[in-house]
Image (cartoon, helix red, strand yellow):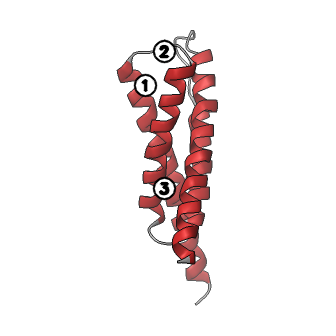
């Protein structure tokens, strides 16, 4: 019972963190949209919720992180549609959101890699 409560708490915390990063990164993406060519280093911020969620999810951290990221993306998009006028096309927003999901998944994979490396060092 306690482990199930911990899993829900980890998921809720992960969704909240991912949504906050989503809104923060979207703010910088929208502010710099006047520039024609530029990188988007703010997408690297999505490594943070991926890492945190993967550390809190003991069973299948990658799948748990991706579900949390998907829920956070939907919640963040809902919040942004209600609060900020949309200036980008829908296809561009979907592509940006999928890129954010990718980086969150990379954060979870980084945790998995570090766990494997630590397990190899401690026989």
Q: Which residue is mark 3?
A: 65
Query: Of callouts 2 and 3, which one flags the residue occurring earlier in the amino acid sequence?
Result: 3
Circle 1 Cα neighbour tier, 10 Å, few/some/many (<14 / 14–19 / ≥20): some
Query: Of callouts 2 and 1, which one flags the residue occurring earlier in the amino acid sequence?
Result: 2
Q: Compared to 45, does 84 lie above or below? A: above
The residue drawn where x is 45% and y is 37% is 74
- Say if residue 101 shows up in the picture: yes
Query: Is the C-beta separation of discs 2 and 3 under 8 Å?
Result: no
Query: Is the C-beta separation of discs 2 and 1 under 8 Å?
Result: yes
Q: Compared to 71, does 97 lie above or below? A: above
Return the residue nearer the eye: 6 or 105: 6
Q: Quadrant of residue 95?
A: top left
The residue drawn where x is 56% and y is 17% is 84
Circle 2 Cα neighbour tier, 10 Å, few/some/many (<14 / 14–19 / ≥20): few
Residue 33, position in %: x, y? 55, 14
The residue drawn where x is 47% and y is 72% is 59
Q: Which residue is mark 1?
A: 93
Q: Which residue is mark 2?
A: 86
Label 2 vs label 3, nearer the camera: 2
Query: Of callouts 1 and 3, which one flags the residue occurring earlier in the amino acid sequence?
Result: 3
The residue drawn where x is 45% and y is 15% is 88
Q: Secondary structure at mark 3?
A: helix
């Amino acid at each position: 019972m306690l482990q199930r409560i911990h899993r829900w708490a980890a998921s809720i915390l992960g969704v909240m963190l991912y949504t906050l990063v989503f809104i923060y990164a979207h703010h910088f993406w929208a502010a710099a949209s006047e520039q024609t060519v530029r990188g988007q280093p703010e997408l690297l911020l999505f490594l943070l919720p991926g890492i945190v969620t993967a550390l809190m999810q003991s069973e299948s951290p990658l799948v748990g992180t991706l579900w949390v990221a998907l829920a956070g993306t939907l919640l963040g998009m809902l919040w942004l549609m209600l609060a900020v006028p949309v200036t980008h096309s829908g296809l561009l927003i979907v592509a940006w959101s999928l890129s954010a999901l990718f980086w969150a998944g990379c954060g979870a994979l980084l945790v998995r890699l570090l766990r494997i490396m630590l397990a190899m060092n401690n026989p």
